[in-house]
Image (cartoon, grey):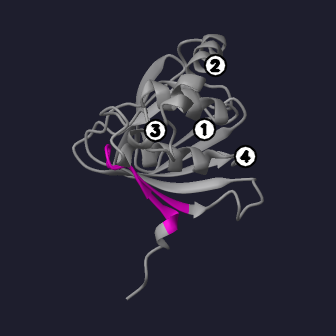
Amino acid sequence: MTAGPPAESVLTNAVTGVEFRIVRSGRETGGELLEMVATYPPASAAPPAHFHPEQHESFRVLAGAMRVAIGGAERTLAEGETLEVPAGTVHAMWNPGPGPARVNWQTRPALRTEEFFRAVFALAARGRTDARGTPRLLDLALLVPSHWREIRVARPSPAIQRIVFALLGPIARLLGRGPGRDPSRAGI
């Protein structure tokens, strides 16, 4: 019997059921690459359209099929197909199908992408995301600015996002928001 990956290398979103198994971390690759095998449950919801300003992503469907919105069009990637997403390209990827889908996902450079997903999944475990697994606005006000190099939602514009998050950040901190904080202990 072979042992599975170490517990710290598997991240599971308690709300969406999406699982990331880290194959090679940014720490292991000197920051060059984060490689994961992502498993998406059947009928997963589309994430918000987003882009990675400094990162290139590569996807290879290992099992099942994935739907992708990129360049203003949607298409389905079948098992064995690949997708390259250059830095700055707005996209979203999900599994609308009746069975699970597995994808090899590489992000170059790694930057702090693993930390971003650990934070999002921690918020999901605390019940602080919507049904799609997206953190609530006050949590985003702290999370997004600290991961500005890794990820941005497509709308509103980055300039508007900076203004909104700058205004909401102090309120979020005051209320004890953020991935590692429990707002019930904020003392307010």
Cα separation between marks 2 and 4: 27 Å
For marks 1 and 2, the one nearer the N-term is 1
Q: Which mark is residue 109?
A: 4
Cα separation between marks 4 and 3: 36 Å
The reply to whether dot 4 and dot 3 touch (C-beta < 8 Å) is no
Cα separation between marks 1 and 2: 33 Å
Quarter of the image that includes the C terminus:
top left
For marks 3 and 1, the one nearer the N-term is 1
Quarter of the image that includes the N terminus:
bottom left
What amino acid type should be assigned to the residue bearing mark 1?
Glu
Q: Say which residue label 2 marks.
A: 166
The segment highlighted magenta reads: 8-22
Q: How many marks?
A: 4
The answer to whether residue 98 is magenta is: no
Tell which tag, 3 or 2, sits nearer the viewer.
3
Cα separation between marks 3 and 1: 43 Å
The reply to whether dot 1 and dot 2 touch (C-beta < 8 Å) is no
Q: Say which residue label 3 marks.
A: 186
Q: Position of residue 169 (x, y in %)?
A: 59, 25
For marks 2 and 4, the one nearer the N-term is 4
> At 60% across and 44% down in the image, what residue appears?
58
What amino acid type should be assigned to the residue bearing mark 2?
Ala
Q: Say which residue label 1 marks.
A: 84
> At 46% across and 70% down in the image, what residue appears?
7
How crowded pointer 3 is (Cα within 10 Å; few <14, some 14-19, many 20+) is rated as few
Cα separation between marks 3 and 2: 20 Å
> At 26% across and 40% down in the image, what residue appears?
97
* Near-viewer residue (33 or 86): 33
How crowded pointer 4 is (Cα within 10 Å; few <14, some 14-19, many 20+) is rated as some
For marks 4 and 3, the one nearer the N-term is 4
For the residue labelled by badge 3, is the local secondary structure a helix, a strand or a loop?
A: loop
What amino acid type should be assigned to the residue bearing mark 4?
Pro
